Image: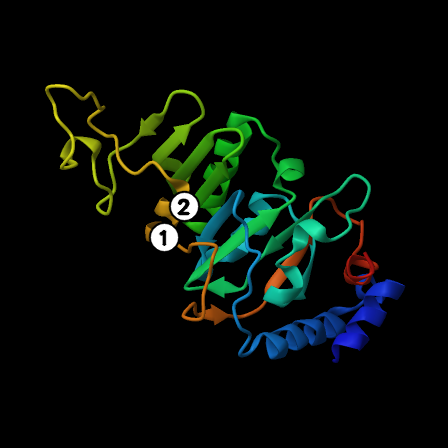
Amino acid sequence: MSENRLETLLQTGFTDCLGERGRRLLARRALLKSAGEKPVHGLPTAWWFAVPGERYEGLFEALDLHDRMPVTLREGVNVADLPSRPGTALVFVTPELDGWRLIYGGLESVIGYSWDGMMDAVRRLSRRCGEAQMFLEDIAGGADIWVVAEEGHIKRRYARESDPEWVGDPLPWETRAVDDEDFDPEFDEAEPNEGTESAMSACEYLSVHPSIDADTRIRGHGWLTLSAPDVGHEGLVVLARSR
């Protein structure tokens, strides 16, 4: 199925009427176009989740995402620029990148900005997928957060808005503040479990840095999903390209 044919299907809304066979053809098209696809810039640099590629299927139920449509990395990477529908938001699930799937897009509509909502979401994802990570970097607002959850429980977390907070024991790759060569216990103060502070540093060790490069292994296709059921994908790609 050519790219122009897909645009026609989207523009007329036929993708929302496809049966099982038609959906398999769309998935096959995405797989074929994804084969040999090169990494592209534009992955999330503000707020995203990561789940293991081999258990990613549980994320759709965990975040209550609907009407997933198979797309390539290039087609979904700029999800923030795609037009939305009233009462819903678009969320992109990437192809497998070095063994991990990233989830980003309209997360503020899916989860909200409340602290409890974010933590509940990463716990739900970890129950369904075995492990889940959350990263948030807001340079303007002074926030830096990274979270690791396993089987529904938060294992390690760093969060900074005004006062920094560490939860859990430092992970093996972290350098504890008290072990830093510049730390002087006579003059400096640090919590025993203070470790890595930067979300952008943590994601490199935990899963995938969003600035993927030519060495990143890409497997499978991605998914474009909606935060509400029965809304449809009609015209999404076409409208985005006409902006």
Left or right of 156? Residue 241 is: right
Instruction: Give the residue number, with chain letter if any, for mark 2.
Output: 200
* Mark 1: few/some/many CA within 10 Å (<14, 14-19, 20+): few
Dividing the picture into quadrants, the one containing residue 156 is top left
Look at the picture and state if 30 lies above or below 59: below
Query: What x and y, as percent, mark residue 155?
Result: 33, 37
Whether residues under marks 1 and 2 lie with C-beta atoms below 8 angstroms apart, the answer is yes
* Residue 66 appears in the rendering: no
* Mark 2: few/some/many CA within 10 Å (<14, 14-19, 20+): many
Q: Label 1's element?
A: helix
Query: What x and y, as percent, mark residue 168?
Result: 29, 32
Query: What x and y, as percent, mark residue 124?
Result: 50, 40
Dividing the picture into quadrants, the one containing residue 224 is bottom right
Query: What x and y, as percent, mark residue 153?
Result: 38, 36
* Residue 57 appears in the rendering: yes
Q: Label 2's element?
A: helix
Residue at 48% x, 39% y: name it: 136
Quadrant of the image containing the C terminus: bottom right
User: What's the coloring here?
Assistant: rainbow
Residue at 22% x, 24% y: name it: 190
Which is nearer the eye, 215 or 130?
Answer: 215
Instruction: Give the residue number, with chain letter if any, for mark 1.
Output: 204
Left or right of 18? Residue 41 is: left
Q: Amino acid at mark 1?
A: Glu
Q: Amino acid at mark 2?
A: Met
